[in-house]
Image (spheres, helix red, strand yellow):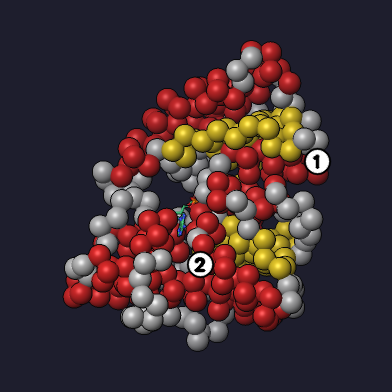
Amino acid sequence: MKILGIETSCDDTGIALYDSDKGLLINKIYNQKKLHNIYGGIVPELASREHMKAIISLLKQTFRKKNMIEDINLIAYAAGPGLVGSLLVGATFACSLGLSLNIPVLPVNHMEAHLLSPMLEFKSIKFPFIALLVSGKHTQIIAAYELGKYEILGNCLDDAAGEAFDKTANLLGLSYPGGVQLSKLASQGIKDYFYFPRPMINHPGLNFSFSGLKTFTAQIINKCGQSIQEKANIARAFEDAVIDILLIKTKKALKEKKWKRLIIAGGVSANYLLRKKSEQMMEKYFNGKVFYSSVKFCTDNGAMIAYLGFLRYLEARDSQLEILVKPKWSISDL
Ligand code: KG4
Ligand code: ZN
């Protein structure tokens, strides 16, 4: 079975083709970062227009030979959460293509796609597991019991981890989205030169708050973030604090559930230090294992959408040609 995956929930246009026997065949991404960089963040109206321009050309690149497109058996698209205009481009495109090819079309949840994306490369991952879902808009700890059955154990009360990375990167003069660059800068910073607060780590429960840390960082940048080395030291202290906070809460969740499997997913799971420290934590405290994707599957992509479409279709054999978008769509409401 061949599944076409379409991702347009934010500022990346992604199209991928997944084969249930051979695995991922094609994964095309068009990245709009340059367009939004000058505004220091995503401009929703520009994002949806850019998806419109990119999507046909990506489809053409995916199917160089015309008859190849007739081999698709299912189309899956990200129906939410995300920016409504951007989602509508993907949804309309998917439904029109499905109608013209007379094949089933399946709306899927973008966050569930992130959550299960490591399964694209690690087929051995089994439920149940704890997931740390960290993206530009989400910071969640999730108990994943089975496909489609998720409990949110912890959530962010203000800025998401990725958002905190991006805003801090901006204050350090790095371009949008700054997560990767902040992390590169941090690798040149002196460890423990600064110690930044870890909000909420002693609160009961598993929720997060990053806005206080962001404000604290802004004050330090104003006071002493002049030279490259000073900026690198600040970036290092910030990154260490965010990762500590994420892992302290994740550890609590794993202990509560007494589970030994952890998945980290979403854009921030591309972070090298987060990967390394979560590996150390799983070995040291749980004799367990952490799974995360190759960097290209951590940020938004069509492959995770195609793969989730495949899993969901196997379960329900559902199809929906009515255009569906849900800008707010919690993974616990599936
Ligand atoms: O999952 P994603 O592509 O988009 C959303 O669904 O939000 O995540 C994007 C986020 C951005 O905030 C970006 O700065 C962050 O992931 N990110 C990183 C790294 N790579 C991407 N943050 C920290 N370290 C990284 N290496
Ligand atoms: Zn995403």
Q: Which residue is mark 2?
A: 273
* Residue 55 point in image, percent of width and height: 50, 27
Note whether residue 112 is visible. Answer: no
Q: Left or right of 93: which side holds 307?
A: right
- The residue located at (55%, 20%) in the rendering is 60
Which of discs 1 and 2 lies nearer the camera? The answer is 2
Question: Where is residue 2, by image quadrant?
Answer: top right
Is disc 2 surrounded by few (<14), some (14 to 19) or many (20+) residues within 10 Å? some
- The residue located at (60%, 35%) in the rendering is 27
Q: Which residue is mark 1?
A: 314
What's the CA distance linking mark 1 and mark 2?
Answer: 36 Å
Q: Left or right of 105: which side holds 193?
A: left
* Residue 97 point in image, percent of width and height: 61, 21
Single out the residue that lies furthest toward the bottom: 202
Residue in the foreground of this view, choosing between 237 and 329 = 237
Above or below residue 203? Residue 183 is above
Note whether residue 182 is visible. Answer: yes
Q: Amino acid at mark 1?
A: Leu
- The residue located at (21%, 67%) in the rendering is 227
